Amino acid sequence: MRKLLSMVLLIVVALAVTFGWRWYSYVSNTDTPYDEVGIELNSRMPLPLRKWGCDKLHSTFGSVLPPYGCSIEDGKTWIE
C-alpha cells in the first residue's frame, strides 16, 4: 500500500510540474498570446495565478486582442 501511495504521489507531482512548466512557458513567451494549450491552462488557473499570467501577457502583447481568460466581457479589453 505504501508503494502505491508513493507512486501516486510521484505521478501527481510530475503532472503538476509538467503543467506548471507549460503554463509558465506560455505566459512568459514572446511569440504569440494565442497558443491554444496555454490559453486553456491559463484560464483554468486560480485567480491570483491567472491574473499574474494575464498581466505578464499584457506587458508583452499589450497592443493585440487579449486571449480567452484575460479579457473583460467585451472580449477586446485586457483585464486590469
Image (cartoon, rainbow, N blue to C red):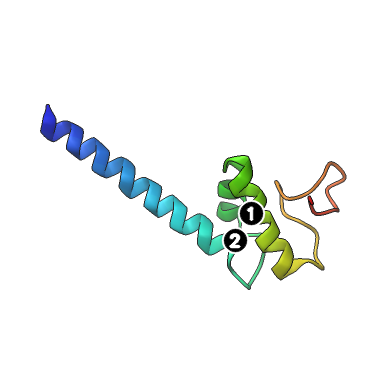
Closer to us: 7 or 40: 7
The three-letter code of the residue at mark 1 reads Trp
- In the image, taking residue 78 as reference, residue 49 lies left or right, namely left
Q: State the SS at label 2.
A: helix
- In the image, taking residue 74 as reference, residue 5 lies left or right, namely left
**Rendering coords of residue 53 (x, y %):** 63, 55
Q: Which residue is mark 1?
A: 52
Quick check: marks 1 and 2 in contact, CB under 8 Å?
yes
Q: Which residue is mark 2?
A: 27
**Rendering coords of residue 66 (x, y %):** 76, 56
Q: State the SS at label 1.
A: helix
The three-letter code of the residue at mark 2 reads Val
The numbered mark at residue 9 is none
Mark 1 vs mark 2: in front: 1
Q: Is disc 1 surrounded by few (<14), some (14 to 19) or many (20+) residues within 10 Å?
A: few
Seen as rendered, the residue at the extreme bottom is 30
Q: Who's the residue at 59% across and 69% down the image?
A: 29
- In the image, taking residue 75 as reference, residue 45 lies left or right, namely left
Q: Is disc 2 surrounded by few (<14), some (14 to 19) or many (20+) residues within 10 Å?
A: many
Q: Who's the residue at 39% across and 53% down the image?
A: 18
Q: Is residue 27 above or below residue 71?
A: below
